[in-house]
Image (cartoon, rainbow, N blue to C red):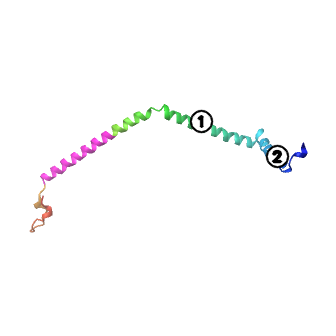
Amino acid sequence: MQINKLEGKEKKARICRRCFRGLFKSIKGPSITHSVLFGICGGLVYYGSYYFYRFLKITYFDTQHVSNESRRRYMEKQMLFYNDFGYDLSMKYIGNLCKYYDPVALRLPFQPLDDKYRL
């Protein structure tokens, strides 16, 4: 049976076995490589499960966005009211200024009044 094996395949198997044997020996026991790989895998599993939990919570069980949207709508209505109120106040202020507008006071002494100062 050993005669039927090709030399190339036998060499590949030996090289692969040698590589994997060295890798598994370094991972197998209590070693630095084992600790580092265990920590990396543990971190990946932890963060993967955490993000999966957050995805499920936000997708199916999140009700806080409803109250936040309600607050945003209320704040927007309040902002529109105060903007409109401020606009009304500024119009009243300008109207009150127009009552006291005296174009003659804007002319230079002993000069005629410019047309740009007339209402």
Give neighbour class at mark 1: few <14, some 14-19, many 20+ (Cα, 10 Å): few
Q: Which of 82 and 66 is in front in this view?
A: 66
Q: Quadrant of the N terminus?
A: top right
Percent from the top left, x then y, of residue 107? 12, 64
Task: Report whether 17 appears left or right of 66.
Answer: right
Task: Report whether 9 appears left or right of 92.
Answer: right
Q: Is mark 1 on a helix, strand or loop?
A: helix
Q: Nearer the viewer, residue 1 or 17?
A: 1
**What secondary structure predominates along the stretch shown in magenta?**
helix
Q: Does the magenta stretch include residue 55?
A: no
Q: Report the amino acid beneath label 2.
A: Ala
Q: Which mark is residue 13?
A: 2
Residue lying furthest bottom in this view? 110
The residue depicted at 78 percent of the width and 41 percent of the height is: 24
Q: Nearer the viewer, residue 53 or 5?
A: 5
Percent from the top left, x then y, of residue 77? 31, 39
Percent from the top left, x then y, of residue 6? 86, 48
The residue depicted at 16 percent of the width and 52 percent of the height is: 97
Q: Report the amino acid beneath label 1.
A: Ser
- Distance between the alpha carbons at the discs numbered 1 and 2: 38 Å
Residue linked to disc 1: 49
From what the image shows, is residue 31 above or below residue 110?
above
For discs 1 and 2, the disc positioned in front in the rendered view: 2
Q: What stretch is highlighted in magenta?
A: 76-100
